[in-house]
Image (tube, grey):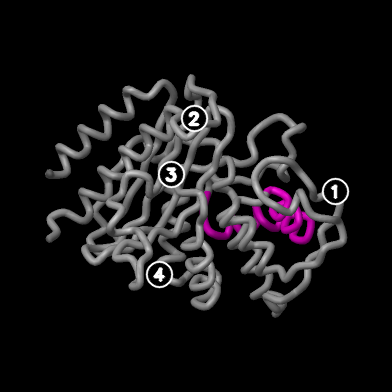
Amino acid sequence: MNKSEISKQIETIASGFTGHVSLYAEHMTSHDTLEHDPSAVMETASVVKVPIMAAAFQYLHDHHVSWEHPLHLEREDIVEGSGVLQHLSPGLSLPVLDVITLMIIVSDNTATNMILRWLGLGPVNDFIALCNLTETKLMKRIDFSVPGPIGLTTAQEMALLLTRIYHRTLVSPPASQVMWDILTQQQYNTIMTRNLPYDLICETDAPPLVRVASKSGSLEGVRNDVGIITTPWGDYVLAVFSEKSKDLRFHVDTEAFIVLPQLTRLVFDYFTFPRE
């Protein structure tokens, strides 16, 4: 299928969604792109944890702090939602690398607050500004009692951040490599990988042919996913956002969990076809 046909399919699927969809994908070699309203400013939900992660690595790099530096779980960090640390005891100490890992792979909200208490919101936003992400902003710590978005961004800006991780130019080559490794351990796979060919992404005795390094985000009416996809037929970054869906369920078959995987599969087929 050519680009025009794929683009029409993306438009058709997006227009049938009850809310709003934004998408940006870019091939890492050809720089060919697929887009749907990629500059729309959208609620990040937990996707904002990617720039938080990067800001943490920048701090460690700039201040020559070890990735084993301990962070302590304080009662003020604890918040409901995704993650496991909310169920553990205050006073627990973990290496900062482990806290970052939990923040990404199980989207641990309490781990996120531990990082933000240590770093501060201002330095995270300063780092985002240094990355020239003009529409991206962290608005607050994870606290559902405080109204308003956790963060704002665009699909294009999140794809740019992922591109820098892909090229190992974000913070430093070692830090970018570790960020890539963490993102590949993602345990929430309801969007980016849901409709991809199982035989290509499943882990058997050999590494899978297709690897996905991703971070998703979910709030009421909001579903997002951003990732780096590496394949034998070419690598690409993808950011897909949705908000204002009329289907407010937190359910495996909520509208966004049906529609967005259709889009991610179209992008996959476009960037990897033809293949044997």
Instruction: Give the structural element (helix, strand or loop) at label 3.
Output: helix
Q: Is residue 154 visible?
A: yes
Q: Name the residue that disc number 4 marks.
A: 167
Q: Which residues are magenta?
A: 109-133
Q: Which mark is residue 243?
A: 2
What is the C-alpha distance between the residues marked 2 and 1? 29 Å
Q: Amino acid at mark 4?
A: His
Kindly identify the amino acid type of the residue bearing the numbered disc 3. Ala
Q: Which mark is residue 76?
A: 1
Type of amino acid under label 2: Glu
The main secondary structure of the magenta stretch is helix
Q: Position of residue 147 (x, y in %)?
A: 71, 29
Instruction: Identify which residue is drawn at 25% across, 43% down.
Output: 266
* 81 w.r.t. 271: above or below: above
Residue 164 point in image, percent of width and height:
44, 64
**Of the image marks 3 and 2, the number of the one nearer the N terminus:** 3
Viewer-nearest of discs 3 and 2: 2
Mark 1 vs mark 3, foreground winner is 1
Give residue 130's mark: none
Q: Secondary structure at mark 2?
A: strand
Whether tag 3 and tag 4 are in contact, CB under 8 A, the answer is no
At 31% from the left edge and 62% from the top edge, which residue is drawn?
A: 210
Q: Is residue 117 magenta?
A: yes
In the rendered image, the vertical position of residue 35 relative to residue 273, given as above or below: above
Across and down, in percent, residue 195 comes to 32, 44
Tell which of 186 and 224 is nearer to you: 186
Callout 2 crowding tier (Cα within 10 Å): few <14, some 14–19, many ≥20: many
Is 29 part of what is drawn in magenta? no
